[in-house]
Amino acid sequence: MLQQEETEERLRPLMIRSLEGDSGAHRQLLGMLGRYLRGYFARRIGAATAEVEDLVQETLLAVHLKRDSYDRSLPFTPWAYALARYKLIDHLRRRSRSIQVPLEDAGTLFAAEDAEEGALRTDLDRLLQRLPDRQRTLIEEVKLQGLSIEEAARKRGVTAVSARVMLHRSLKWLNQVLRDENG
Amino acid sequence: MRTADLIELLARDVRAAPPGVVNRKLLAALAAGGLVTLAIVAAGLRCQPLLEAAQQPWFWMKAAYTGVLTVAGAIIARRLSIPGARIGAAPLTAAMVVLAMLAVGAGQIYFAPPAERLALWLGHTWKVCSPLILLLAIPIYAALVTAMRGLAPTRPALSGAAAGFVAGALAATLYGLHCPEQAAAFVATWYTLGIAAATAFGGLAGSRLLRW
């Protein structure tokens, strides 16, 4: 209980600063959340399961895209926990449905089981290849070359606003595809 | 992509988010859906003579019943759209209001002369009342569920039921502009049934629609 209060005291200010547009606070918040999520999912579905890291990424993406649903007058940890739990339940629900496919497919389902801890079954980079060229290049420049949105936008000859919109749309799209892939 | 890279990417997508987005999204959806339903009531069904009706207690009795349920339902739907938020006392309030209405309706039947009881209960429009409320709830439900998908309901079926309840209650309120029925027993039965149907269908659809 005390530990949760401490976590709350550390995370909530970060979330509030993130909502005010502080990307450093956002980065720090997601980093800390990621470590908690990894532990939580590992306990629930097995530490060596390849889906753990997938779920961590899917949940971080959801935390990012669903920031609007956080009410600043409420504590942060229950919000984050409810989101993580939802992602886990959704994952298990989809997984138990896929067990009902014919027996010959069982091999494919369990093929990825021997992956190392922290390994990914679904590679976001691979998914991003499916994006239209303009969006993909933008993401690659931001991610690989570490450019800011403004720099990448200038390089591409688009306005910073439209680059932002493009990035945000790509992330939303990624969230959708990731969910379908992990099912 | 490593998780650290993903976080880096997400940090680039940070913009200031104004507070109160949840309320604004939900209220905008209620307004948009409500206007469509209001247009259908006004243009399709026609309102009763409102100036005269507004002088009658029964007109306000109906509006108060469905209006209170709309507000209680909106509070529930809002809480369900926020992960980890407690639902609170609104469902209890809504249940008490429905029970009170049922009691008043039953009392009215009980104290009425036996020969008039059936007419009080069925009115002239009992066959169409609940189905019409259910149909009128559709635009509101659609708008509300779209808004809720943009938030983060973690209990899809329950959230869908709450959206259906709000849609049904608001649709019933607007339907009251058309419906000239006056008996409490009528409202307690057929209005409530329409709202209950919207809640049930809302839950069924929500369990599919409200996943993200």
Image (cartoon, coloured by chain):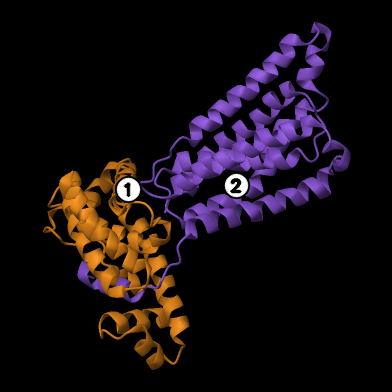
Would you place residue A89 above or below residue B113 in this image? below
Residue B205 visible to an observer of this rendering: no
Who's orange, chain-wise?
A
Horizontal side of B117 relative to A65 (left or right) equals right
- Please name the residue that numbered disc 1 is placed on: A82
Q: Indicate the chain on which mark 2 is placed.
A: B
| Residue at position x 45%, y 62% in the image | B19
Q: Amino acid at mark 1?
A: Ala
Which quadrant is the C terminus of chain B positioned in?
bottom left
Percent position (x, y) of residue B119? 82, 17
Q: Residues within 10 Å of mark 1 (few under 14, many from 20)?
A: some
Who's purple, chain-wise?
B
Secondary structure at numbered mark 2: helix
Secondary structure at numbered mark 1: helix
Choose between A99 and B143: the one closer to the eye. B143
- Please name the residue that numbered disc 2 is placed on: B141
The image quarter in which residue B88 lies: top left
Would you place residue B81 above or below residue A150 in this image? above
Q: Indicate the chain on which mark 1 is placed.
A: A
Choose between A123 and A31: the one closer to the eye. A31
* Mark closer to the observer (1, 2): 1
